[in-house]
Amino acid sequence: MHAPDSDPKKIKLNIGTDSINGTENWVLPGSRTSRRLQIYGTALKVASRYAYASLRGRSKQARLERVNLAHIRGASDLYETAVKLRASFLKLGQFASSRSDLLPTAYVDQLSQLQDRVPPAPAAMVLRTVSEDVGPIEELFTKFDAQSASAASLAQVHRATRKDGREVAVKVQYPRVAELVPREARDTRLILNLASRFVKGIDLKTIGRVLEQVVLSEIDYVQEAANMELFGQNFAEESAIQVPRLHRDLSRGRVLVMDWIEGENLARALAHADHDFASEALRVLVDAFLKQILIDGFLHADPHPGNFLVQSDPIRIGMVDFGACYQFSERTRLALRELYRAGVEMDMKAIGHALYELGFRTESGDVEELIAFGSLFDFDADDDLNQEESFRKLVEASKVNPLIKIPDELIMLGRVLIVQTGLVAKVKPSWKMDDLVMARLAERI
């Protein structure tokens, strides 16, 4: 840290040039009505292509080709609308991009771009929002970087330096989010409810309901602040995990200020790291989630790569963005402990029954069919099926006999596990998952 500059005339803000170019009044585009029409219009356009593709009178091969084309064009439509509207529709796209078990590859590939390629809003809007909700920029900071460190569906983050020299991340919610998001989240849920009548094998109603709850929680910065502080307490003794400290005196309204955490986006870090580094970084992340699931019962439910920042010397993971968090009931947490214990023991039948008791249901309704989904909890790396094939097995099972009922509490956990299983399959780490699980299960709670 450096000493604060005592002469206000020497304070210089790196605010860029757009603050004087008429962008101060930037807001999410469109009126309530026009945005709603775009959301429903996109849904109708996507649905109509599938209806056309399924018309009789064509050969099976011709229908298959049209369905594949509908996948590609539908994914493009959803991506373009999400980038344009942002807010809850973009959040839906981010969620969908991580569910390769539920969606065709074309959707996953296209929508995955929403994870870290969202165009930032003008810095002038950010400065105006901070000034309105907290106070004049010049009185709060000695530096404020106009270039967004990260931009997302509902907000973006800028790096700044406080008067006392502390480096902070300033998270600023986009204007009109609180006005538009609740209605649009409800519309998204209604669209998924409607789609559930035609799309069989996926519990779209539950997904829509949980997504609405999560999106609404992400615009509540009072709750996010509380989540961040609880995570800080839970990981206070875990040196390999860094949780930012909240700066309550500067966190008001549409603004959250927290410690700046250095690190590289997880996906980018793993892409160029050597095997040993990638293996250890992934071990730290997976173990942190095991603690959340088995010990704390409090889950960081947004496995966006940008929310995990990899540090070296020593290897640590910085965790950020605590808007989407989930508190499990004690009953569910204890049931999950038994589920993981069965996974360590490779008792696939017990896993299937545990999933059934938790409320999972497949299209067939047969408890035995849930065993295929136990591949998420098959932790023995020395088994004939390696992690990659276990993941493939899960995806194939979800297509043949899809999950049609997923407990509300575990929708977001499923998203976390799918992402982590994919990472493990790519990295093929040197450590064993069952060792991590048993260590956490052995902890006194």
Image (spheres, helix red, strand yellow):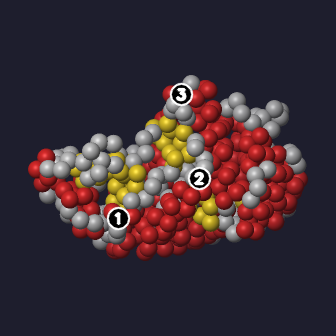
Residue appearing at x 74%, y 59% in the figure: 445
Across and down, in percent, residue 50 comes to 55, 57
Dot 2 crowding, Cα within 10 Å, few <14, some 14–19, many 20+: some
For residue 249, the mark is 1
For residue 235, the mark is 2
Q: Nearer the viewer, residue 341 or 72?
A: 341
Q: Is residue 136 left or right of residue 158?
A: left
What type is the residue that disc 1 sits on? Asp
State whether residue 135 is above or below residue 437: below
Across and down, in percent, residue 245 comes to 45, 55
For residue 285, the mark is none
Marked residue nearer the N-terminal end (1 or 3):
1
Label 3 close to label 2 by CB (< 8 Å)? no
Marked residue nearer the N-terminal end (2 or 1):
2
Between marks 3 and 2 in the image, the one whose residue lies nearer the viewer: 2
Q: Is residue 398 left or right of residue 121?
A: right
Q: Which residue is mark 3?
A: 273
Residue appearing at x 53%, y 56% in the figure: 232
- Quarter of the image for residue 434 reads top right
Estimate the spatial distance between the alpha carbons at disc 1 and disc 3, rounded to whole Å.
38 Å
Residue appearing at x 49%, y 42% in the figure: 309
